[in-house]
Image: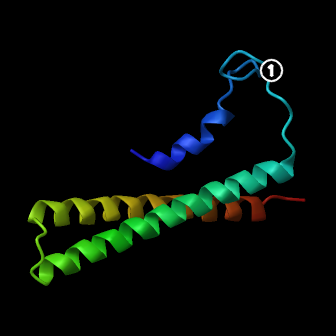
Amino acid sequence: MISGIGLLEGLKTNPLGGSATGGVTPPVSPASTATSFAAALNEAALRTVGSLEKAESVSLQALQGGEIQAREVVDAVMNAEQSLQAAIAIRDKIVTAYLEISRMAI
């Protein structure tokens, strides 16, 4: 469904603290986690923009009388809508987490 989740494959751990593959997970520095999270967000944003641009391009080609079938237009628009909804949901979760952290007592 969401192909960007595959980037987080290496973060799976079991409840006992080891990795999902059975080995011991090495400690991860906070800087590298922040960088990979930012990279994952950037990748997701770029995919969403690409999906929206593709839907726009396919729609314009169909309106201009190109050899685009209605099914291709609908598929592109539905894919773009799904990507946009996922991006909005992720943004809402990030804003909610930020507000939750800002309300914490120091």
Q: Residue 92: x, y in percent?
A: 54, 63
Q: Is residue 15 left or right of residue 87?
A: right
Tell me, what colour scheme is on the image? rainbow
Q: Residue at x 10, y 65 (%)?
A: 69
Q: What is the x, y in percent for residue 14?
A: 68, 21
Which of the image's four quarters has the N terminus?
A: top left
The residue closer to the viewer here, 103 or 14, is 14
Q: Horizontally, is 58 left or right of 65 in the view?
A: right
Dot 1: element: loop
Q: Is residue 105 above or below residue 8?
A: below
Can see residue 63?
Answer: yes
> Is 94 rendered above or below residue 61?
above
Judging depth in this view, the residue of 106 and 49 nearest the camera is 49
- The answer to whether any part of residue 92 appears in the image is no
Q: Amino acid at mark 1?
A: Val
Mark 1 highlights which residue?
Answer: 24
Image quadrant of residue 86? bottom left
Res 20 quadrant in image: top right
Q: Nearer the viewer, residue 37 or 88?
A: 37
Q: Residues within 10 Å of mark 1 (few under 14, many from 20)?
A: few
